[in-house]
Image (cartoon, rainbow, N blue to C red):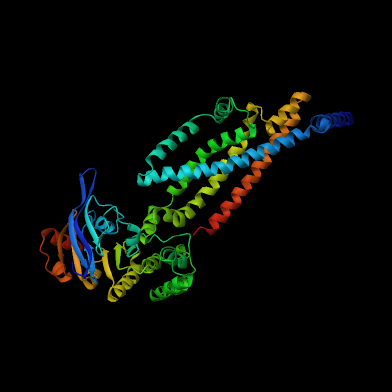
Amino acid sequence: MQDNNLLIVKNLKKYYKKGEIKALDGISVTINKGEVVCVIGPSGSGKSTFLRSLNLLEVPTSGEIIFEGVNIADKKVNLDLHRRKIGMVFQQFNLFPHMTIMKNLTLAPMKLLKESKEDAEAYALKLLDKVGLADRADAYPSELSGGQQQRVAIVRALCMKPDVMLFDEPTSALDPEMVGEVLDVMRSLAKDGMTMVVVTHEMGFAKEVASRVLFIDEGVVLEDGTPAEIFDAPKHPRLQQFLEKILV
Amino acid sequence: MNEFFDSLVLWLQTAWANLSDQFYVNFIKANRWTFLWEGFCVTLKITVLAAIFGIIIGIIVGMVTFTHKKTGKLKFLNVLFQIYLTVVRGTPVLVQLLIIYFVVFASVDVDKVLVAVIAFSINSGAYVAEIVRGGIQSVKEGQFEAGRSLGFSYIKTMWYIIIPQAVRNIIPMLLNEFITLLKETSICGYIALNDLTRGAYIIQSRTFSPFMPLIAIALIYLVMVLLLTLLVKYIERRLTKNAR
């Protein structure tokens, strides 16, 4: 195994109803450190299921997910320890509504990493400042706009100092005018060298930021290549169809 | 006209004399009010203790049934608790009280207050369990996922993230359950336990006048329920104010 491999997915399968529905039908992918992988595909293709399997929010039917050398799909593994290193951002933000922004950000570092309150708050404030929300530290999530909440959600994941960030359609629940501010944060994150796996419908973002694009349909990776290969010279007919439909 | 007034005044005078006489006979004479006072204390004691144990039982049962539904674990406990919930919620609380007193404790000499506390705790616990489970279920699934994805264990996610949100939904319903509990304790007389209702009954059996003692305890129950209702409203306001 190369040192560079952060996440190796081997023959990942997720079946529902005893195999009647195959959400994932044998996906094998290797993700290297520093890569920004965008996952595209029609709705219902299994791309979200694939992403959610990477930190075992969806328990796969079979297959291996080797994260930093450990198969975390193995039931004997203490998953919680590995999840700390895998940040996740959800479509619906999922901030904790009963806590201030600052408490949202410091809860996990303090309780899980045993950071002191001062350290956790200082780090959170630094990141919050980076996304332009340092002045909202004492607000509650419901007092923020969707775009602001999603930026906070990204910071919340970053506060655990993860080695990889998973984004599950992070801009799909946002009003159009707020999409840009969230993509900006993700763009600068990519620039800083964070390994990212992004399920998205934002083709512009995928083209510009991704180092690699996966096209998933019916639970399999149909094409895997650079943005140029995927968008400018698609080989698989289904990908060609898909791109025709969305890039009008 | 004068005649009418005279007769009205006379009627009022007799009525008043009658009432004050009744009041004297039912409450003052032979210190009969102590039946109500002691009964009130017993009712309060049973309600408060049953509420506390009911909460403890309810939280345990509610958490277990929820956890089973969510994760499929704790199968055995879940089956046990489902039977408990079905039986307790499917039979009258009076029958449960009678069974515990006359069947379970048939051959043991046991304090009746204790029997009532046990019966009402078991009964109330079942209802509290459903309230707890419903309250936890009403917290959005995304909150679980956010907690777990940060690396919190199931229990820590529950403790730091889910339960604080569930409590907001649970507390008003819980207080309503205790209003019901308070009123239901009035059946304690069936096991010859001298609660508030039986206090009135004892007075009535000595004075042969049901009006005063029954109206008195009705008022006492009413005032207690109204106070609890005020508390519910106050807490609901506080909770919605802080809910963001």
Q: Where is residue B229 in the image (x, y as percent from the top left)?
A: 62, 45
Residue at point 49% right, 69% down? Answer: A138
Q: Is residue A188 placed above or below B195 in the rendered structure?
A: below
Q: Where is residue A31 in the image (x, y as percent from the top left)?
A: 21, 66
Quadrant where the N terminus of chain B sits is top right
Tally of numbered discs: 0
Residue at point 34% right, 69% down? Answer: A182
- Residue A33, located in which quarter of the rendered image? bottom left
Q: Where is residue B151 in the image (x, y as percent from the top left)?
A: 37, 60
Residue at point 68% right, 33% down? Answer: B195
**For residue B17, side relative to residue A232 (left or right):** right
**For residue B112, side relative to residue A131 (left or right):** right
The answer to whether residue B9 shows anywhere in this view is yes
Q: Is residue A150 placed above or below B227 in the rendered structure?
A: below
Comparing B4 with B94, the one in front is B94
Q: Is residue B147 placed above or below B38 in the rendered structure?
A: below
Comparing A136 with A32, the one in front is A32
Q: Where is residue B167 in the image (x, y as percent from the top left)?
A: 51, 51
- Residue B45, located in which quarter of the rendered image? top right
Comparing B210 with B79, the one in front is B79
